[in-house]
Amino acid sequence: MSNSLLTEEVLALKGRTVTYTAPDPAGAAAGRYFGLAIGDDNPLYSDAGFAKEQGLRGVTWPPTLICETNQYADLPIDRDGYAGHTWGLDLPGTRQVRGGNSYVFHRRVRPDDMIVATWSIDDVVGKVNGRGHEMVIITSTARYATAEGEPLAENTETIIFVGLEQKSEGGKA
C-alpha cells in the first residue's frame, strides 16, 4: 500500500541541517532557574562550593536544559506558542505526535560554555499503523557542542505525523 503523505518534498527533508549558535555564554543563572522550574533542587545547579566538592569547576546545568534551543536560537514564536527549534513541518490532514527522545550526555554544561546546536534530519519513513492510518515518521538529531567543538550532548527525537483519515486497501481514504 502506498503512502500519499510520503511525498517527494517530504522525502527531500532527509539530510536537512540547521545550526544555532548561542549569542552569549550559558550562564549560571539559567541552570539554577531551570532547576527551580522543574522542581530539581540539586545543589550542583546553585552551589559552586558543593559542585567543586563533587569534582566540578563550579555550578552546572540540569542535563536536558541544553536541549531547550529557545534560550539561544532567537527564533520567532510559532502558532503553538513555542520559540524553540522545530522543522516548521506542516502536513495537512495529520496530527503531530512526539514519538520520544533519546539523550547522550558527553559532559556537563558550564556557565562559561558557548553552545552551538546542529540539528539534522536523519530519516524520513512512511508507514501505515494498525488502524489503517498513514504515518510519516521523522527522526532528527541535535548535536550540542562548545564553540571550540567539544561535544556536550546529543538529542535524537522522533516526530510522527498521523493521517486523520483511515486509508482503504484501494489506496483512497
Image (tube, helix red, strand yellow):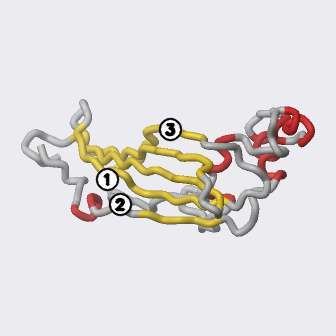
Nearest to the observer: residue 42 or residue 148: 148
Q: Residues within 10 Å of mark 3 (few under 14, many from 20)?
A: few
**Camera sees residue 163:** no
Amino acid at dot 1: Gly
> Where does label 2 land, which residue?
15
Amino acid at dot 3: Ser
Q: Quadrant of residue 58?
A: top right
Q: Position of residue 100 (x, y in %)?
A: 47, 38
Tell me, for residue 93, which label it has, or none.
1
Amino acid at dot 2: Gly
Q: Tell me the residue at 73%/38% (across/down).
A: 38
> Where does label 3 land, which residue?
102
Q: Position of residue 129 (x, y in %)?
A: 26, 35
Whether 172 is drawn above or below 72: the answer is: above
Nearest to the observer: residue 100 or residue 155: 155
Say whether residue 86 is left or right of residue 60: left
Nearest to the observer: residue 110 or residue 35: 110
Query: Which marked residue is nearer to the observer: mark 3 or mark 1?
Result: 3
Query: Which marked residue is nearer to the observer: mark 2 or mark 1?
Result: 2
Separation of marks 3 and 1 at Cα, in angstroms: 28 Å
